[in-house]
Structures are given as C-alpha cells and as structure tokens.
Amino acid sequence: MKSRSIAVTMMAVSAVAAVTLAGCTSEPENGETSEEQGITFWVQEDLPDRVEATEAIVADFEEKSGIDVEVVSVAEDQFAQLITSSAAAGDLPDVIGGISLPQVRTLSASELIDTEAVSAVVEDLDPSTFSDKALELTADGDAQLAVPSESWLQMLLYRTDLFEAAGLDAPDSYDKILEAAEALNSSDLAGFVGATAPGDAFTEQTFEQIALGNDCQLVDEDAEITLDSEQCVESFDFYGDLISNYSVPGAQDVDTTRATYFGGQAAMFIWSSFVLDEMAGLRNDAKPTCPECAENPAFLAENTGVVTSIAGPDSDEPAQFGEITSWTITDGANATGSQEFIKFMMSDGYEDWIAIAPEGKVPARFGTPDEPTRYSDVWATLPAGVDTKAPLSDFYSAEVLDAVAAGPANIARWGIPQGQGDLLGALQGEQPVANAVNEVTQGAEAEQAATTAAETARAVQESLQ
C-alpha cells in the first residue's frame, strides 16, 4: 500500500526489468478522433476511498473536455505482471499515474514510453513551475520520461520530549543517532527501531537513506557497482551496530516499526511522510497506542521531531531519500487525449489530486507561471487523514511541515544520477541490499555482507547488458 508505506511503490518493477517489450495501445478506429476514442488510465491505487476520489476528479475532466476516461485501479504488487501481459498483448493503457522512479526507468528501458508526448506536456505546463530535482530525476538526458507529480519524503522521526529531557541534540548524524540510541535505550524503550526484514524493499529504502548520508552509492560515475566501498561498509557496520545493540528483537518491517514507535516503545524510527496523519490519530486502523495517547491521541505528533537529511563520517554533506511519483504516456497511446488529461490533473485537478493524501503527496509542481507558489501554499492547508480529517498544521510545527514540503527539491537516489535507473528497478527482485542489512543486524561482518550485496548487484547489472 503506497498510502501506508514507503516500500511498495518499488516492489512492482522487478518482473519487467530484464525484458524488452514491444506492445502498444491500439490506434483510433473507424475514423474516430482522439477525443471520441477516449483513453484508458491506470492508477496505482486500490484503497476504495482514494479510488473514489480519483474517479470524481476524472469525471470533472470528462465533463469539461468531452474525452472519455476508463479508470482502472491497479494494485501495486500486481503492476509489473499486468504491464508485462498488457504490453505483450498490445493493449497498454494510455496513461499511467502514480508510478515510482524505478518503474519509470523500467518502462523506459522496455521502450514503452512516448517521450515526445510527455515532454510536450511539461513544456505546455512550463518547466519553471516544477521542482528542478523532480524534472532531473524523471528525465534521461534530453528525454523527459514522465511528468513529476508529487513526492513523499523519508524521515528519521524522534521523540522530542525524551531528547530534551536527556539533553540530546537532534539525531542528524551517525554519531548523534548512536549517542541518542545508547542514552535512551532501556528495558522499556528501544533507542531506535528500523527495518531489517530480508527481501523487503522497505528495508532497502531505509538503508539507502542511511547510506546516502555517508556517500555510499550503488554505482560510481562509470556505472561500476560500489556497494562494497569503504563508505558502504561503514554504513552497513553503523546500521548493524544500531539494530544489534539498541533496537527490538526479530525481523522488523513497515508495520512493526510503526507499531513500536506508536506504542511508545521506541525513541526513534525511520518511516515516510505518509505516517504523519496516522501519528496525529486521524486513521482508526493505525492509531498511536502509547500510554499518553489514551488521553491525547495527538501526543506523539506533538512530541515528534523529524530529520530529513542524515550525515555520515565519510561524506561532505548530508543526504535525504524520498520518492517522486509521476504520470507517463505509453508508446502508441492516444497522445492527444492523454496529454490533455495529464495537463488537467496537473492544473485544474491538481489540488483535488494532492488532497487525496497530502501527507504523501507533496507537490512537485509548485505553482503556475502567474502564481508560482500556488500549490505549495495550499498543500499545508489541505485536510489529511482518513476517518478524521484535519490539516497537518493543526498538529505539527511549521518547522516540521517546511522540512516535508522541501522534499522534492532535495531528494537523492541511488543509480539514477549515474544513468543506472534501470538497474535500480531490476534489483528490486533480488533485494541484495535488504538481505545484507538483515545479515549485519544478525551479527554478520559488514565487509562480507557488503561484498555479497555487490556481487549480486554486478550479476544483475550484467544480465541487463
């Protein structure tokens, strides 16, 4: 569930990564115009309330444009299989929404994107209205692969009340994280809880944030695998120490890490901005259960700080991890209808679209040429939550919300800047990094775990050539 975790948007790409597919959508028949033919739109969302909200926005577009849109809700863990079979059958959707950066790269490697149609949309909307970083991450040289829509940001969240009582600094570096974990760890409270489950994309993403802060990269500028570099060995060693000595027993995943922190049993954890509405008590099936939360459901929200960028000892500057989700137009699609639809979703329909889940839909398009900050300004005022709705500003400080809003401008990712985005997608099947993380948190030597991860990554890279 993309709406509830940072892991799943990357899980759906692995089945497509090693094959090149030649399917395409059908051409207009019987002399129909693009408008008369309509378009098929796949949305990677299967939560009923969000599908319903999407359909309402689409209905508004249909009424205003006269273009029919068939909305197909696609479960994210089924996306790769459905794209593969649809491409093979020559029956791709025209538009896909909510796709992650690795998915964009995998679709591009399989030559399933109409880059000219996508580029025209960005030009019509005006590139200056978008985050430069978001455009950079969704492009391949001069080819625009997708229209960046929104982002979620991964964060280290921590108990400000406990940190203040102990006289601890914000945990924004390896040293400060370890210092705080050691100081606060006890039989009743874990100093830190983080993902360790093998074969899990959430584990890989959690570690990628830690690793980026120490300048541990998946590949170097020559596209050589560097997971066994000194920086990466240091990152594996740090995370292994943190989990082995200051965390809770057993494999941890996206659900258990949240539950531990929500239960008041951890001083720090790593999750995405999607947790913000839940931590404020706005979702009934994921409410905080800490002792103080019985009287004040928003206690954790009011006593949690966020660190977006972490610094390691081997890096000149800190780094942060996040995801850009985008729109794209498939090769052979009804380009005219698809372009009109995406432009609507990024303009007249954009506020309603990000309002579906503002905690995880930080605008990658800040505004319009006439109102440069229109969408960024409205974002913080939008009601978040599921069972209860309220603006995030009712619970979080301006400092916290500003850090989240700045996400699209500062996101770093493995592989994509070095032109190896297709490798990043392909690795989601093997998950060598997640497996290495699990090994070091169970006592394996960091150097050996890093070597094994690097060897697996090299084998996957060779399979793509």
Image (spheres, grey):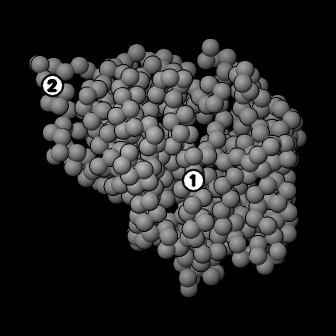
The percent coordinates of residue 219 (x first, y second) are: 72, 28
Tell which of 34 and 263 is nearer to you: 34
User: Residue at position x 75%, y 64% from top?
Assistant: 170
The answer to whether 34 appears left or right of 112 in the picture is left
Foreground mark, 2 or 1, reads: 1
Q: Residue 223 carries which label?
A: none
The percent coordinates of residue 114 (x first, y second) are: 38, 23
Please, what is the three-letter code of the amino acid marked with disc 2?
Thr
Q: Earlier in the sequence, mark 2 or mark 1?
A: 2
Callout 2: SS: loop
Q: Which mark is residue 33?
A: 2
Q: Which mark is residue 406?
A: 1
Please, what is the three-letter code of the amino acid marked with disc 1?
Ala
Where is 421 relative to 161, above or below? above
Where is 287 relative to 227, above or below? below
Task: Specify the quadrant of the image occupied by residue 338.
Answer: top left
User: Residue at position x 82%, y 74% from top?
Assistant: 167
The percent coordinates of residue 265 (x first, y second) are: 70, 70
Q: Visible in this render: residue 181?
A: yes
| Quarter of the C terminus within the rendering | top right
User: Residue at position x 66%, y 55% from top?
Assistant: 308
